[in-house]
Amino acid sequence: MDLLHSGWAALQLKLSFVATDSVDWKSFVQFSSWIVTLFESYLLIRQYPLYSKTSPPKELEKYFDEEVFRKSQNYGKDKAKFSLVTGLLKQILDSTLIHVGFYAWAWDVAGKTIGYLGYSSEYEITQSLAFSAILFLASSIPSIPISVYATFVLEEKHGFNKTTPSLFVSDLLKSWILAFVIGGPFLSAFLYVFKWAGDRFVPWLMAFLLFFQITMVIIYPTLIQPLFNKLSPLPDGELRTRTEALASKLKFPLKYLYEIDGSKRSSHSNAYFFGLPWSKHIVIFDTLIKESKPAEVEAVLAHELGHWYHMHPTKLLCISQVHIFTILALFPAFLHSPQFLRSFDFSDKVSAHPPTIVAFLLFQMILTPLEAFVGIGINFISRHFEWEADRFACDLQDRLKDPEMTDMGDRLGRALIALHVKNLSTVWVDWLYSAYHHSHPTLTERLKAMEGFRVRKEVHIKKEL
């Protein structure tokens, strides 16, 4: 632990320029955030011409009829235009808020608000909660028209929306209530750990964040998800039998097997698992069950269990911990820099003792360009995990010595194609756009990889003979 703190102290010494040198951090945030936004717009412009293609890739021609492909292209084109416009609008709003000193104003308003309730500025956590509530409302309210358009115009136009106006309002209110019920105590505890641990807050804060993540894994399926979706035990039948048998053969600690009413909001399909290491839940969308054969759904679940077998969730958790550690290790130099806050129009009085929540928020803005590169790296790792899970499903016959698993790769391929067809997913993807945005390989890439698995397996068998 002492070695960790000595290394941390050396890092802070290298970052001492934050407190001593005159840096226009406000202009830096404006410039860097616009660079990221314009780069993302450039990627959309690169991708957009691909939606004008009149036929799918050769590998997919026999699976997409002309009408389905046309719908897929139109859906992708509309989503791209929507993303381009909303991305620019969001950046304009964020840039305007920074330019007019909104964050300094919000902190002052938060102080006056708690003052009416009898609290002074010494109650930093209380003022931080009021400040966060103002920011939450400032970001949530402008996003409502965008969400309405996305749900009732874009998704409705292409036949995916199943959400009613009353359900939309209900979901919105529930989300806001949860944000305050969970976010308030979380933020209070987060800031308390900062104050309690002093300059050695990094390991303590990381432990708290890990504890919070584990807690959410426990309470999400039992307390939160039922507020939005109905989880019903998967009925007895071929799919349940196949799923339980597969889990048993792989020694997957399956405790609950659910069907979720995803069709309540959308006709998109999916399946996933979650839970603690000794108690896992598998959730299958009712849309997937209706649109795919049990054998194909089993192949999708085999892929998901490949993630579990190779410990992908645990590996991603470890990566996220390294990411969080890096952010927290860099933060103190900005936390103890009065001129950092002054760059964003905070008064000398506030800047002299920077509030933790304010400094952390502004620090995250500084990291915007870095986070863009981190996202590309995480996508690269995630795509590797997807190929690994596909390979796991294709190799199940050899792993389990079960002749019924011989065609698992073919089944998975058919299931992926069916999902893309039903979801009108894009099949022509620019490589740079995909690298930046996609955590999964494209359908063509996955099918080629699975065909490669099959060919190499056949060659290996022939060599053995």
Image (cartoon, grey):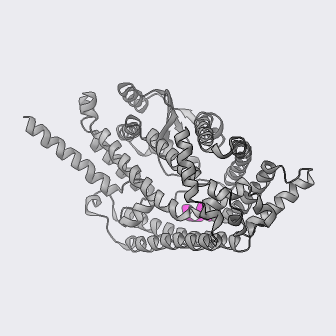
Depth order, front residue of 72/355: 355
**Which quarter of the rendering shows the N terminus?**
top right
- Residue 267 on image: x %, y %: 51, 51
Give me the residue at 64% from left, 73% from top.
24
Residue 316 placed where, x, y %?
A: 46, 44
Q: Is residue 348 above or below residue 187?
A: below
Q: Is residue 327 above or below residue 308?
A: below
396 falls in the magenta region = no
Q: Is residue 37 found left or right of 389 in the rendered image? A: right
- The residue that appears at 26% across and 53% down in the rendered structure is 448
Answer with the quarter of the image where residue 198 lies.
Answer: top right
User: Could you say where residue 124 lies in the image, as x and y percent from the top left?
Assistant: 79, 51
**Figure disc tally:** 0
Q: Which residue is drawn at 42% across and 41% down?
A: 312
Which is nearer the eye, 208 or 257?
A: 208
Q: Can residue 99 be seen in this view?
A: yes
Please name whichever residue, 224 or 240, is drawn nearer the observer in this view of the structure. 224
Provide residue 406's location: percent of width, then percent of height.
24, 35
* Magenta stretch: includes residue 150: yes
> At x 42% / y 59%, what residue is drawn?
425
In the displayed structure, 395 sits above or below 20; it is above
Q: Horizontal placement of 9 versus 391: left or right?
A: right
Identify the magenta region: 148-155
Q: Is the magenta stretch mostly helix, strand or loop?
A: helix
Q: Toward which corner of the image does residue 301 lie, by quadrant?
A: top left
Q: In this view, does 20 lie to the left or right of 111?
A: left
Q: In this view, does 402 lie to the left or right of 186?
A: left
Point out the residue furthest to the left here.
465
